[in-house]
Amino acid sequence: VSADVVVAGSGAAGLVAALTAAAGGARVTLLEKADTIGGTSAVSGGRLWVPANGRPGNEGDTIRAAREYLNGVFDERYGEMTDTFLAGAAPMTEFVERHTPHRFAVCPHYPDYHPAKPGATLGGRCLDMHPLDTRELHPRLAEVRRPPGYVPMTHAEWEAWRYPAYFDDDLLRHRRENRIETNGVALTSALLHGVLDAGVIVQTGATIEDVRRVSVDRRISGGLRITVDGETRDVGALILATGGFDWDSARRKEFLPSPVAGLGGPPSLTGDGLTIAESLGAATGNLGDGWWMPMMAVPGETIDGERFCRGLVRERGAPKQVVVNEAGRRFVDEALPYNEIGKAMHRRDADGGYPNGIAYLVFDAGFHRRYPLPGILPGQPVPDWVPAADSPRALASRIGVDPDGLQATLDNWNAMCPHGVDEEFGRGGNPYDRYYGDARVTPNPTMAPIDEGPYYAVRMLSGSAGTKGGPVTDVDARVLDRDGEPVPGLYAAGNTTAFWTADGYPGPGSTLAIGMTFGHRAARAALESG
Ligand SMILES: Cc1cc2nc3c(=O)[nH]c(=O)nc-3n(C[C@H](O)[C@H](O)[C@H](O)COP(=O)(O)OP(=O)(O)OC[C@H]3O[C@@H](n4cnc5c(N)ncnc54)[C@H](O)[C@@H]3O)c2cc1C
């Protein structure tokens, strides 16, 4: 197969790139290393952070307000990239709706992650989706991966139901039986349908091994010779969308904070795009950062044979739990956005150690009656793998935490709860924290005493929803070499790339929105250069 455009990686960034190139008239091949389609995108929430999206629920939002909000959240040195993202995100979503069955739905109450910053909104920028009925769609949608613990529920339904006791089980059963999808499964499925419909050749189990520069004259110029599973072909443009280097243990050790241990993406994320780009002389950046997300491992849950970890996104806002380090001390407002929790877990002490690298979420029987955790459902017996004890001190001894420290922490916490003021870390003091609280609990929906035995703890891992270092790209997603010049024919988008955003995470859906916007731009630039 000879193709004008080859896209490596079938996550959302790669699928949008392939769709854009095919819709623009190119012959496109999409190569996916794993046997299933969708990468981390398929196991994700599938939500996109798109300011000024022009949809009902986001009225009055402007690019200008979003730009003000992003000042200081993203690295100002790369303001041009921020402007390009803001200008391109909403048109990208409209393109996706024109070319796929995906239909976005505004989350009108989902706040930005720094709600006190000028330009922030308390809802409207995050786009979820309407459920996707895949029964009449392309049969290859069966190849889209499904994460352990996947519940086909929209964000609006979660907002309405909140806790498992209120879930509409009949509706969810109907969805499961009829392949009606939500979350990243819906996003990936809809994009895959559009891609196949547009004539893209999609190959799974196909790994790019080598890329060389050659001078070929294709309709889209560039001239790269790629080797895929021993077979060589010349392509006009190669778009790298191979995700992060999460599962490359050598790079993880070299670049990431050592506590990072929870990985949500598949083991095929070994930084191949970065390796390829480096071999072609690309400049690299932001290698030490990730989209941090505290995680939990449920024993037995795997992804392509490796340990799968589930994100702790909503649970930390519930009352009747705190997170402590090995000293038994709290170290952060537990209800903060996940990226901020990661930063707190990576904080160094004067000796260069990570005092919060090992952390436990401690909860009581009252929490277990009401609120879910991955693999631990309210109203069902607490699984054997969850450490339990009749007193906080005994629990601390079981998990290797300082008993006096934990007892003092819970005494202090319980004393603060009736007033609803977290004097240590201000939990529940902002709209984001309260969004994930329990409105039935007053005066602070995130605070209630941990005072009902048995007491339980689960290990909260420092995790990553994807690394965000890689080859440096420009506003057209062209990979740049060390002199700042584009590497001919080479583009990159998504977690493969160096995110100019540095350690910033502005709101729910930022990573997919940015990856897809630049995947779209990469393909357009490839088409224009042809
Ligand atoms: C639990 C969880 C929830 C999340 N929820 C959200 C959310 O709601 N919104 C949001 O914005 N972000 C979310 N994220 C983060 C988001 O999923 C990722 O940042 C995003 O999916 C990355 O997309 P990508 O296209 O860059 O890479 P991926 O989706 O990871 O896809 C990369 C693909 O490339 C393939 N590949 C690797 N090497 C090669 C090769 N050599 N040749 C061919 N193919 C290759 C991989 O197998 C993989 O399929 C979440 C993450 C997690 C873990």
Image: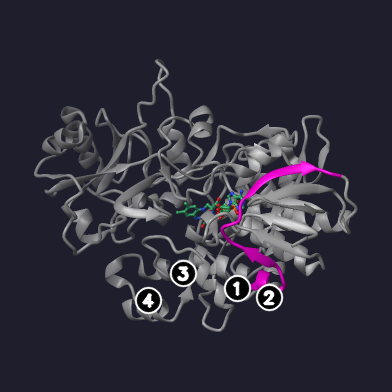
Report the Cα–Cα distance between label 3 and label 2.
26 Å
Q: Residue at x 73, y 38 (%)?
A: 78
Of the residues tagged 4 and 3, which is closer to the observer? Answer: 4
Marks 1 and 2, the one that precedes in the sequence: 1
Outermost residue toward the top in this view: 351
Give SS at disc 3. loop
Give me the C-alpha separation between circle 1 and circle 2.
17 Å
Instruction: Write down the residue under mark 4.
Output: 172
Query: Measured along the vertical axis of the image, is residue 337 above or below residue 44?
Result: above
Question: The disc labelled 1 sits on which kind of residue?
Answer: Arg
Q: How is the image coloured?
A: one colour
| Mark in the foreground, 2 or 4 | 2
Q: Amino acid at mark 4?
A: Leu
Q: Tag 1's secondary structure?
A: loop
The answer to whether 218 appears left or right of 472 in the picture is right
Q: Which residues are magenta?
A: 193-214
Secondary element under disc 2, as helix, strand or loop, is helix
Q: Nearer the viewer, mark 1 or mark 2?
A: 2
Q: Horizontal placement of 54 versus 146: left or right?
A: right
* Dot 1 crowding, Cα within 10 Å, few <14, some 14–19, many 20+: some
Q: Quadrant of the C terminus?
A: bottom right
What number is the disc on residue 103?
Answer: 1
Q: Is there CB contact under 8 Å for labels 2 and 4?
A: no
